[in-house]
Amino acid sequence: MLKDKVALFRKLLFFILGAALMGAAGISFHHSRHLPEPVVLGPGVTQVKKLSDYFQDLKGTINDANVYVLEGEKPGGAVLILGGTHPEEPAGRLTAWIFTENATIEQGRLFVILSANRSATTATRLGGAYPPDYTIPTPWGGRTFRMGDRWSNPLDQWPDPEVYIHYPSRQELAYVDIRNLNRTWPGRANGTLTEKTCYAMIQLIKEEKIDIAIDLHEAELQYPVISTIVAHDNGQDLAAMASMMISGMEGFDIGMENSPHALRGLSHREIGDHTEAISLLLEAPEPMLDATRGRTDRKLLLEGKDEFVVKAGQHGLLFERIDENGWPIDKRVGRHCSSILQIPEIWSQDFPEQAIRVSNVPRYAEILEKGTGAFLRDPSQASADRIRYE
Ligand SMILES: [Zn+2]
């Protein structure tokens, strides 16, 4: 009798402990999924649209992202910047933020998406013990962002199939990549949430007559596609010229690679195949993504210093250099800002009628000197109608 009571008591105790753990984790997950990320509309922003303006079906879903439109007085060409395809690569989103909050446009139009896969900003790698968020120090305090993941949140798209068959190529891809925004281009209207998101962005590119689409990423140092511009066939001249100009003028080296024809679903392949736009993808180094990294915390995310990755480099296992100074976030954001600025500058020389002239955006050297946070605006100093949330 007594034995039964003790067993019952033990079960109850474990039940209560389990429920308390679940509750605490649930609150933390809920908090990080709903952490508001303000955007202060910079002087160049003339409209804020939604992806559902281009594809109605996205309305009411988590992936109905904001599309910031910056327009010059003089007509010209159009550039689309995609941040947040993979939110766990924060330099991509932060660069898009800097353009939205600072850029002015003299000629042409700039479209910026900060959360291309908004669902993926609301979770971190399952079981990965990633930090839920990170804070960029600014002169007025700091700005906190959701850490995010490489894949759409399973809460928004589930279950995954045994095999993911890419549309329309029918290429078989890893099952989990059915939630990877950089494997679901060009998307489809009646597909999954991630496919619909790509479909909406393809409609945007067609409707707004985008000339150049630039998708921002970061890569692990053990991955051969790093510190480079990946270009669709239609952008090879532009990318080669940009890589030369950047390496000569901006203070860092960047390579150029052709988008492989056999690899389907990626933005640099499918945007170029399915629209008129030149399609480019930028990769910066992010040691936190390396499999051999040590403790995965906010410090590693922002400072990019890791002794184990350095060790891998000493054994010749890396495709990019790293030393004890690491790859801090300012370097990675600075690389993206300078690379994006060079691309329309070169394009505009060749096509003056379709020029896109952007100013007021810091370049690599300036970001290294002042820090990324110097170019994030203080929401408490902005009027309410100039603030949006991601
Ligand atoms: Zn990526």
Image (spheres, helix red, strand yellow):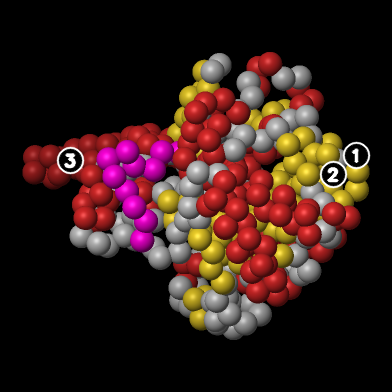
Looking at the rendered structure, the kind of residue marked 2 is: Gln
N-terminal-most mark, 2 or 3: 3
Camera-near label (2 vs 3) is 2
The residue lying toward the viewer, choosing from 349 and 206, is 349
**Which numbered tag is attached to residue 10?**
3
The residues tagged by marks 2 and 1 sit, at their Cα atoms, a distance apart of 6 Å
Mark 2 residue crowding within 10 angstroms, few (<14) / some (14–19) / many (20+): many
User: On screen, 347 above or below 99?
Assistant: below
Q: Is mark 2 on a helix, strand or loop?
A: strand
Mark 3 residue crowding within 10 angstroms, few (<14) / some (14–19) / many (20+): few
Left or right: 146, with 114 as reference point: left
Q: What element carries label 3?
A: helix
The residue lying toward the viewer, choosing from 2 and 107, is 107
Asked if residue 22 shows in the view, the reply is: no
- Where residue 205 appears, x then y in whole percent? 78, 60
**Which numbered tag is attached to residue 107?**
2
Q: Who's the residue at 21% across and 52% down the image?
A: 311
Asked if residue 352 shows in the view, the reply is: yes
| Tag 1 residue | 73
C-beta proximity under 8 Å, tags 2 and 1: yes
From which residue to which does the magenta span run?
319-329
The residue lying toward the viewer, choosing from 350 and 46, is 350
Looking at the rendered structure, the kind of residue marked 3 is: Arg
The residues tagged by marks 2 and 3 sit, at their Cα atoms, a distance apart of 71 Å
N-terminal-most mark, 2 or 1: 1
